[in-house]
Amino acid sequence: MNERDARLGGVLRRIWGFETFKSHQREAMSAVLEGRDSLVVLPTGGGKSLCYQAPAVAEGTLGVVVSPLISLMKDQVDALTANGVPAAYYNSSLDAAGRREVIRRLQAGEIRLLYVSPERLTGDGSGRFLDLLRSVGPRFVAVDEAHCISHWGHDFRPEYRRLGTLREALGDVSLHAFTATATPRVRNDIVSQLGLIDPAVVVGSFDRPNLTYRVRRRTNLLSQVRRVLDAHPGEGGIVYCLARRDVDSLAARLADLGYSVAPYHAGLSDEERKRNQDAFVNERVDVVIATVAFGMGIDRSNVRFVVHAAAPRSVEHYQQETGRAGRDGLPAECVLLYSPADFAIWQSILEGSGEASPEALELLRHMRRYAAQVTCRHRALAEYFGQEHPGDCGACDVCLEELEPVEDATVLAQKILSCVVRTGQRWGAGHVVDVLRGADTERVRRTGHDQLSTYGLLEGMPVAELRGYLDQLVDLGLLAQEGGRYPVLSVTPAGWEILRNGAACTLWRQPPPPTKKKASKRPRRDDASWEGVDTELFDRLRALRHEIAAQRGVPPYVIFHDRSLRDMARLKPVTPAALLDVYGVGERKAASLGPRFLAAIAEHLATSPHT
Ligand code: ADP
Ligand code: MG
């Protein structure tokens, strides 16, 4: 190990309280240290920030970090400050005195990491600021969330486009781009837009082993969402809805039922949005019900679940949104509740906004395939992003064998398909379901469909269950569902194979309806990540964290991550030296926060006789 590596390792331990590098961090740091341009693609929670922070600290130099949001800059600077690293942001949230103070610290060479917005560096009137930067000689520029530079990414920002001029403006700096977006097109775009020169390209695995993926057909949204919430009482989560009105109605209904929720979408006032986001980040609210407008800039690390109340428009979006769960590496759950109708809705949204390019529709089809197929979800996601995965992940509904195949699926499929044929292939799912169940509706009588041989063929099957099978037949391409707002079902050639020749097919039983039993008030803490953790102590330390965070005006995770609290509640250190062995406790935090946490642990030990 050379001297530089040793220094980095020391910084990692002393400042951040981490024992080892995460995968690819060392490579990414080497590029920064060597001043070689780089593109680093690591999943959310992969530890990208440290890749540029640790080198600046280890070398005692200045690094400039381009970040898209003021709230993100603040969180990062708060987190660095809590670890004793001199850092600052320079953006429109500072008043004149604040700006002068940052400039003073820059000129005195005190700052290791300076966070700035892209417009500050390239917008109108950026000249003087660039002059200042040149005079203090930053060693590198790190562009965080670099996918914002690309049209093909999910958060395109025009200001990012101009960052290519930075190298010329700042002279001798290296440029380093960081993103979690995995598609090659976005990657290539970043390299060319930023004008990276012979960059080191570091690409990690996109698999997130700590996330458990589940896909369910949407039968009763409210009760399905409640089931997830009830499994995580007091824990943080996000529920993504497709439209603003869905957000409003779901949030209202959950609030009425006593859940700790807040809505978030672009139709709310700036003030309300900010209030709800802050409440979530500061853990005053457990669950945000949101459109895709919510997410970037949310660094809350202990999000324990992400629910999609409808399918997103692409696997890229899905990956990005589910990626907000479990940044701390602890287990988290991602549940996709979808209906085939979601894809028709997306198509009409895209058409309405002029975005229905062949590419966009192709992305939508991929999403549909992901939702419909029944294979290891981790593997499906990895392969979608061009990586290998052995499957059998033990962390998805398929590998956990939560899905139950229907016996005699072919016969069931034949019954449904034949009813579609008998009714003339000109009706929607609702009517076909009525006929199969033998319902006595005005339409059934008017059409004379109560005289068909398929009338009442599946009498007694619940509507939701039958609807689910119809959806599956559509997903399997055995039924086509076409025609705008009131889509009509028809049998495809593959469907005829089943009808005529009894070709085999597999259908999956719908999940049983939620039990009525009252949810417990305490989270289930029985997975391996809780092993040896004194949960009572954990709750106590969590309350202390909340109190200190509120006093300091920072989010709780800036004080300590959940992982650190669990580790404390496992190791129960009572001396400052033992506290340093806890995950994520560096020297600064041991000194500034240690006394209060050690006292809480000691008090707990004194008052709880069994431990
Ligand atoms: P990203 O920006 O890639 O999404 P972050 O930089 O926010 O990820 O880091 C994710 C989490 O991983 C943070 O809680 C961070 O403290 C933690 N982390 C980073 N590097 C390490 C490491 N070497 N060991 C342990 N935890 C780490
Ligand atoms: Mg990040």
Image: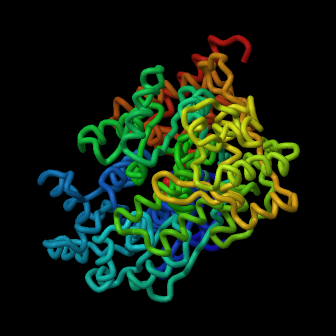
**Residue at the location (70% across, 54% down)?**
421
Ligand 1 shows up in which quadrant of the image?
Answer: bottom right
Depth check: give the residue in front, 86 or 192. 192
Q: Nearer the viewer, residue 306 or 535?
A: 306
Image quarter for residue 65?
bottom left
Task: Place residue 567 in its image quadrant.
Answer: top right
Q: x, y (%) of residue 189?
A: 44, 80
Whether residue 559 is visible, yes or no, is yes
- Confirm whether residue 13 shows in the render: no
Residues 435 and 320: in front is 435
Q: Could you tell me which residue is drawn at 39 percent across and 63 percent down?
A: 155
Q: Residue furthest bottom?
A: 198
Q: Where is residue 558 in the image (x, y as percent from the top left)?
A: 44, 42
Q: Which residue is drawn at 40% across and 58% down?
A: 349
Residue at coordinates 34% horizontally, 54% vertically from top-left?
73
Quarter of the figure with the C terminus: top right
Q: Position of residue 473 (x, y in %)?
A: 70, 53
Q: Is residue 368 above or below residue 275?
A: below
